[in-house]
Image: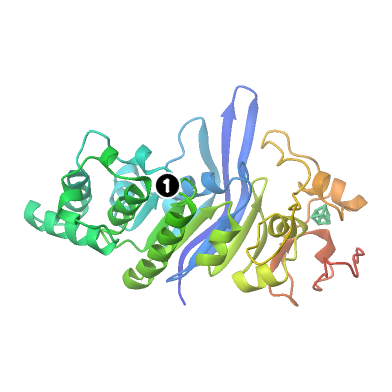
């Protein structure tokens, strides 16, 4: 498996009147070709700012102040506007939670689909139309020719998201960034869109960076999971290990607060407290005010993200300083240096 995207020590800060806000605070991870990598965490953890940084769409007062974003070996932070425009929609595409904000309400669906192809591919208008209709069919839109001539408001939310996926995949990008792609949809439509994305990923051989707060979506789609908290990566694992044996207390809290179909529970555990605001992070481990396992060292020193040799997960937590897998379910919860 080759590496498609490699992010090293990315820092994206916002310069506000109240001071500097480090939204993305030294994030590193990689995404392999043909895989789906999920960035998960509560809102405000920095996952969307990470995806906007990759697309070079962070606007003032935000700025990438450090690190590199290597896409097929090229550092995107060093590309000029024209070079980035060539990549966006062509090699890297993005879909969002609410397609209405990305679709132009006054232009027909077909016009918007054709535009992407005309911009990035040397095709005639006639070829663009044929390809657009073909893409609408591929994403499961019935009466594709009719939808091609419709305006966005004439379609349901699920259909609009299918149109966005068609548009995003029309130039066969190597990387699709999907930011909360199913959050605005009802449950049945969510399941259909997830199935569609899984099938299209295989058909188009596109890698997906999935941004979500929903672990149910992660379980459906992801191969690898990056858990973010307060602008940092706190755990990285393959999807099976993450759900079978979460190693970071925050990951464990997220999993415990996710409803399970098979479990009969009246009350879901939720993680106590809130994500700290990026401008007001605690000292030491950012999670310590909410962590049931916090020790003295956690309040003053930040742990590094380290490979846990036993579990194979990368974890940022003092409990893992010994390099041993930690049983967060009751035993051996002592700090060993
Ligand atoms: Fe909890 Fe300490 Fe680990 Fe942070 S470093 S997650 S406070 S045990």
- Characterize the local packing of mark 1: few (<14), some (14-19) or many (20 or more) Cα atoms within 10 angstroms: many
Of residues 120 and 130, the one nearer the viewer is 130
- Where residue 162 sits in the image (x, y, percent)? 33, 54
Query: Residue visible at 32% across and 72% down?
Result: 203
Q: Which residue is mark 1?
A: 96
Query: Residue visible at 33% across and 55% down?
Result: 165
- Where residue 164 sits in the image (x, y, percent)? 32, 50
Dot 1 lies on which element? loop
- Give the answer, above or below, for where 192 lies relative to 107: below
- Where residue 76 sits in the image (x, y, percent)? 42, 52
Image colouring: rainbow
Left or right position of 129 against 170: left
Query: Residue visible at 78% across and 45% down?
Result: 272
- Where residue 193 sits in the image (x, y, percent)? 41, 59
Tell me the quadrant of ligand 1: bottom right
Asked if the beta carbon under badge 1 is closer than 8 A to the nearest atom of ligand 1, the reply is no
Query: Residue visible at 53% across and 70% down?
Result: 223
């Amino acid at each position: 498996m080759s590496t498609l995207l490699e992010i090293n020590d990315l820092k994206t800060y916002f310069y506000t009147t109240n001071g500097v806000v480090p939204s993305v605070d030294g994030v590193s991870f990689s995404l392999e070709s043909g895989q789906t990598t999920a960035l998960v965490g509560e809102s405000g953890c920095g996952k969307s700012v990470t995806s906007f940084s990759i697309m070079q769409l962070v606007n003032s007062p935000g700025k990438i102040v450090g690190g590199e974003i290597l896409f097929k070996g090229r550092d995107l932070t060093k590309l000029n506007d024209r070079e980035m425009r060539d990549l966006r929609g062509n090699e890297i595409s993005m879909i969002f939670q609410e397609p209405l904000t990305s679709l132009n309400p006054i232009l027909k669906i077909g016009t918007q689909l054709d535009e992407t192809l005309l911009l990035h591919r040397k095709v005639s208008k006639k070829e663009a139309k044929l390809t657009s209709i073909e893409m609408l069919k591929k994403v499961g839109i019935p009466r594709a020719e009719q939808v091609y001539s419709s305006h966005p408001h004439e379609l349901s939310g699920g259909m609009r998201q299918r149109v966005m996926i068609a548009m995003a995949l029309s130039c066969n990008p190597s990387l699709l960034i999907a930011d909360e792609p199913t959050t605005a949809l009802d449950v049945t439509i969510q399941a259909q869109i997830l199935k569609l994305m899984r099938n299209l990923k295989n058909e188009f051989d596109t890698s997906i960076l999935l941004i979500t707060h929903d672990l149910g979506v992660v379980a459906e789609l992801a191969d690898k999971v990056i858990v973010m908290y307060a602008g940092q990566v706190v755990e990285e694992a393959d999807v099976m290990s993450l759900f079978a044996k979460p190693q970071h207390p925050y990951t464990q809290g997220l999993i415990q607060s996710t409803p399970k179909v098979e479990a009969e529970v009246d009350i879901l555990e939720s993680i106590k407290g809130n994500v700290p605001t990026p401008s007001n992070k605690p000292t030491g481990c950012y999670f310590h005010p909410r962590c049931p396992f916090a020790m003295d060292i956690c309040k003053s020193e930040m742990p590094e993200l380290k490979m846990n040799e036993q579990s194979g997960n990368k974890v940022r937590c003092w409990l893992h300083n010994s390099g041993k897998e930690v049983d967060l379910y009751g035993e051996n919860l002592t700090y060993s240096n």
